[in-house]
Amino acid sequence: MPSYFRQVPDFEYVSRDPNQRQISEYATVKNLFRRGKLRDDIFGNLSYFTKYQIIGDERPDNVAYKLYNDETLDWVILLSNNILNIQTEWPLPQTVFDKVLLEKYGSYDELYSGIHHYETKEIRDSNGNLILPSGIQMSNQWKSGNGFVQGVVSTGKVNYIYFDQEFKVFNISIEDFNADVKSGSTVSISGSSDPNLNGTFIVQSTSVGFSLSGKNIFSFRIVPNNFTSEEVVEITGNERFEFISNEPLSYSDNYYYRYYDNNLESEVTLSSSNILNPITNYEYESKIEDDKRNIFVLKPQYLNIVFNDMEEIMTYKKGSTQYISRTLKKGDNIRLY
């Protein structure tokens, strides 16, 4: 960068040195408010550039020497990519990168095994139509909507299904079923001998207890879409209860994706493990670092245009009371007023 800063004009301002002898003393500094840039018609036109991938621990001056045979043109590499902070916008040397990540995550186990986030896998239907694109960043838990479902399907034994004539509600009890479901959740029921019980309902209340054998008993209450006259509903063993919760569920296995396959004329349900890839902290950080390696470099035949533009940008023009020369301005001394 020395050749860049040699082009930056100077500015004289009142010295703040406590050891100065006179209040009229000035200090000369570089005017960093004058910043070089590629003009818009070049910066926004890809035909002026070629793609380049930074290799290993290459620095901007290494790239400049490789492309222009002049390492002092590193500033052209940086301006071409609008890089202001080389510490955060240019790939770190591998040893520095590893050290920074270890300090950030605290241990090798957290760095290499800790999950930063999840990304979707590509899902297509039986006709090859894209259903879910890959690479969507998300949690392994979600709220129901747009095909994403948080819920749990009962696998336990149904103890009883009883219709309360007084309150017009179904009371249902399932043995050996740990359901993280609360009032307000949705339940879809199928396979019941009572047609009034097959459908989708809002769970009115829930309770958890234990059977005499020590197994968990999950009970819940729903209001049927149509009232029934029979109090006790015959249990067929084919009943299926799918609860869709409106609150976060505890286990990632209770989250899945659902879509309708027109070719199969049926609904397809995939568990979260079948649609998500876990991304570790190291994979996440490496992806960010690798993305920095893809840059654009100005084609050598356009360098003279940039040099001429830089001279125009960095040169002071006459007309200001602060103007001293093409490379120097002098600020007002407010201590004299």
Image (spheres, rainbow, N blue to C red):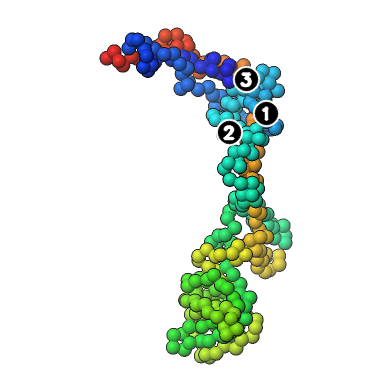
Q: Nearer the viewer, mark 3 or mark 1?
A: 1
Q: Which mark is residue 58?
A: 1
Q: Position of residue 317 (x, y in %)?
A: 44, 12
Q: Label 1 is placed on what type of residue?
A: Glu
Q: Which mark is residue 73?
A: 3
Q: Position of residue 70 (x, y in %)?
A: 66, 18
Earlier-in-chain disc, 1 versus 2: 1
Q: SS class of the residue under badge 2?
A: helix
Q: Position of residue 272 (x, y in %)?
A: 63, 61
The Cα atoms of the two marked residues, 1 and 2, are separated by 13 Å
* Residue 96 at least partly seen: yes
Q: Nearer the viewer, residue 200 or 73?
A: 73
The answer to whether the residue labelled 3 contacts the one labelled 2, judged by CB atoms less than 8 Å apart, is no
Q: SS class of the residue under badge 3?
A: helix
Q: Residue at x 59, y 38 (%)?
A: 100
User: In the picture provided, is 198 more to the left or to the right than 95?
Assistant: left
Q: Which mark is residue 89?
A: 2
User: In the picture provided, is 78 more to the left or to the right than 264?
Assistant: left
The answer to whether the residue labelled 3 contacts the one labelled 1, judged by CB atoms less than 8 Å apart, is no
Q: SS class of the residue under badge 1?
A: loop
Point out the residue furthest to the left here.
337
Q: Position of residue 8 (x, y in %)?
A: 51, 17
The answer to whether the residue labelled 1 contacts the one labelled 2, judged by CB atoms less than 8 Å apart, is no
Q: Is residue 252 above or below residue 292?
A: below
The Cα atoms of the two marked residues, 3 and 1, are separated by 14 Å
Q: Label 2 is placed on what type of residue?
A: Glu
Quadrant position of the C terminus in the picture? top left
Crowd band around label 3 with a 10 angstrom C-alpha radius: few (<14), some (14–19), many (20+): many
Q: Nearer the viewer, residue 69 or 278?
A: 278
* Residue 331 at least partly seen: no
Earlier-in-chain disc, 3 versus 1: 1
Q: Residue at x 54, y 15 (%)?
A: 6
